[in-house]
């Protein structure tokens, strides 16, 4: 039986467990929050993104000693070996420490293999899309139980997609996609023969500096097509509408904030756009890990932190911008810069007029 693990902890320097979640593939769950960690050991990120989402579940708080007893009782109740899956080795280290506590020298008998999710799976679009859809305002990222549930959703979606491919072709890499307690390694990628330089000759490749002072930060899923996108033919079905807007506002440049940027280069992303628009795709936002100091000022709103991190790195703090996205809980409540789409619909006629109105007002300033 697969059991997906996630933990939250104080900091990588003064590391101590705050909360732990276990989500089995059959739906059984465990969640515990410690009451005896030291808040003063928490990083700025943890104070901004983790601590505010604690306390959502009754009767889960406990001391370190009590947590050890509860965890061992949960594992002892399992009727088969549990294969533990996690996306960061620290999750296993903290769980292992909690299972042993101060009085035990071995793990419960039901603790089986420990498997680290590889970067190839974690960056797979199918995995990413399912993982992101698992979050909600009630269950946001950085709550250990929400993260463990999302990890299960992403992995199950990826396995289903892999199984579907087996029907049409022989599997190439299947059982080795999970590495047992092995560090992540880089991978060799083939040259992209469909880069913008080939598809649209004359377009600069790589990241570009902004030429103007207005940026549109663009999400894909739930914006350029419905999410989930039930038919492949519907992928990017709203892109022509967006390109029409951009042609009417030629001074606006685009930075990609979509999760698609995590497994595709900026040159790959430009290939989806018409030639005249592709040359206005100047960059992608950084990952929140790179700009996590902003959580202290902005709060636990990942997409906004990434966007404002990009603005900070651009050296132009007065940059005028709007963001088109479908996840309002990744932004501060009431943020005027956000144009929010309905996830299952995407960019509509009404939202097109809203975007045009906002860009018009910006250009008059």
Image (spheres, grey):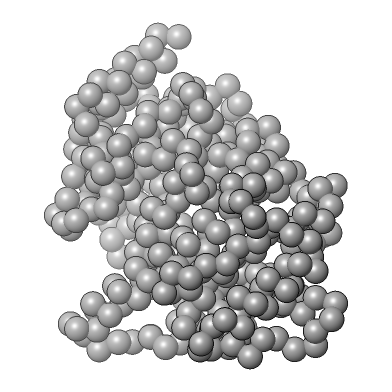
Tell me which corner region of the image, top left, top right, bottom left or bottom right, holds residue 96. bottom right
- Image mark count: 0
Horizontal arrangement in the rendering, residue 242 relative to residue 175 (left or right) = left
Instruction: Name the residue located 23 percent from the left edge and 53 percent from the top edge.
Output: 229
Q: Nearer the viewer, residue 112 or 318?
A: 112
Tell me which corner region of the image, top left, top right, bottom left or bottom right, holds residue 108. bottom right
Q: Nearer the viewer, residue 351 or 56?
A: 56
Instruction: Name the residue located 50 percent from the left edge and 34 percent from the top edge.
Output: 331
Horizontal arrangement in the rendering, residue 204 relative to residue 178 (left or right) = left
Horizontal arrangement in the rendering, residue 11 relative to residue 30 (left or right) = right
Q: Nearer the viewer, residue 30 or 286?
A: 30
- Answer whether residue 49 is visible to the viewer in this image: no
- Answer whether residue 165 is visible to the viewer in this image: yes
Instruction: Name the residue located 28 percent from the left edge and 61 percent from the top edge.
Output: 194
Horizontal arrangement in the rendering, residue 52 relative to residue 217 (left or right) = right
Q: On screen, 118 above or below 289? A: below
Q: Position of residue 68 (x, y in %)?
A: 74, 72
Q: On screen, 315 above or below 160? A: above
> Which image quarter holds the C terminus?
top left
Instruction: Name the residue located 73 percent from the left edge and 74 percent from the top edge.
Output: 69
Tell me which corner region of the image, top left, top right, bottom left or bottom right, holds residue 349. top left
Q: Nearer the viewer, residue 348 or 191?
A: 348
Q: Position of residue 315 (x, y in %)?
A: 62, 32
Q: Position of residue 8 (x, y in %)?
A: 67, 58
Q: Position of residue 239 (x, y in %)?
A: 23, 40
Q: On screen, 314 above or below 258? A: above
């Amino acid at each position: 039986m697969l059991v997906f693990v996630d933990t939250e902890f104080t900091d990588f320097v003064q590391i101590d467990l705050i909360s732990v979640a276990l989500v089995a593939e059959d739906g059984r769950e465990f969640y515990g929050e410690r009451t005896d960690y030291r808040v003063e050991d928490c990083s700025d990120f943890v104070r901004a993104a983790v601590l505010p989402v604690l306390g959502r579940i009754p009767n889960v708080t406990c001391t370190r000693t009590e947590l050890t007893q509860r965890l061992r009782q949960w594992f002892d109740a399992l009727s088969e070996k549990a294969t533990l899956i996690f996306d960061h080795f620290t999750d296993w280290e903290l769980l292992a420490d909690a299972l042993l506590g101060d009085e035990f020298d071995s793990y419960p008998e039901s603790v089986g293999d420990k498997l680290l999710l590889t970067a190839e799976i974690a960056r797979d679009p199918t995995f990413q899309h399912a993982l992101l859809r698992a979050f909600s305002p009630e269950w946001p990222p950085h709550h250990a139980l929400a993260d463990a549930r999302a990890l299960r959703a992403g992995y199950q979606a990826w396995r289903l997609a892999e199984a579907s491919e087996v029907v049409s072709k022989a599997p190439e890499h299947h059982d080795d996609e999970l590495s047992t307690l092995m560090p992540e390694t880089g991978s060799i990628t083939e040259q992209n023969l469909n880069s913008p330089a080939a598809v649209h000759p004359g377009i600069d490749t790589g990241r570009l500096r902004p030429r103007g002072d207005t940026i549109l930060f663009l999400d894909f899923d739930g914006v350029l097509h419905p999410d989930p996108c039930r038919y492949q033919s519907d992928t990017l079905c709203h892109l022509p509408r967006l390109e029409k807007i951009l042609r009417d506002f030629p001074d606006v440049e685009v930075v990609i904030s979509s999760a698609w940027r995590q497994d595709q280069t900026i040159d790959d992303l430009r290939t989806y756009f018409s030639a005249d628009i592709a040359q206005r795709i100047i960059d992608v936002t950084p990952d929140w890990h790179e700009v996590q100091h902003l959580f202290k000022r902005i709060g636990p709103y990942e997409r906004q932190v990434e966007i404002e991190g990009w603005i900070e790195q651009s050296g132009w703090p007065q940059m005028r911008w709007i963001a088109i996205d479908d996840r309002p809980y990744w932004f501060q409540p009431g943020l005027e810069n956000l144009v929010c789409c309905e996830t299952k619909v995407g960019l509509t006629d009404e939202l097109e007029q809203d975007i045009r109105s906002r860009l018009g007002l910006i250009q008059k300033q």
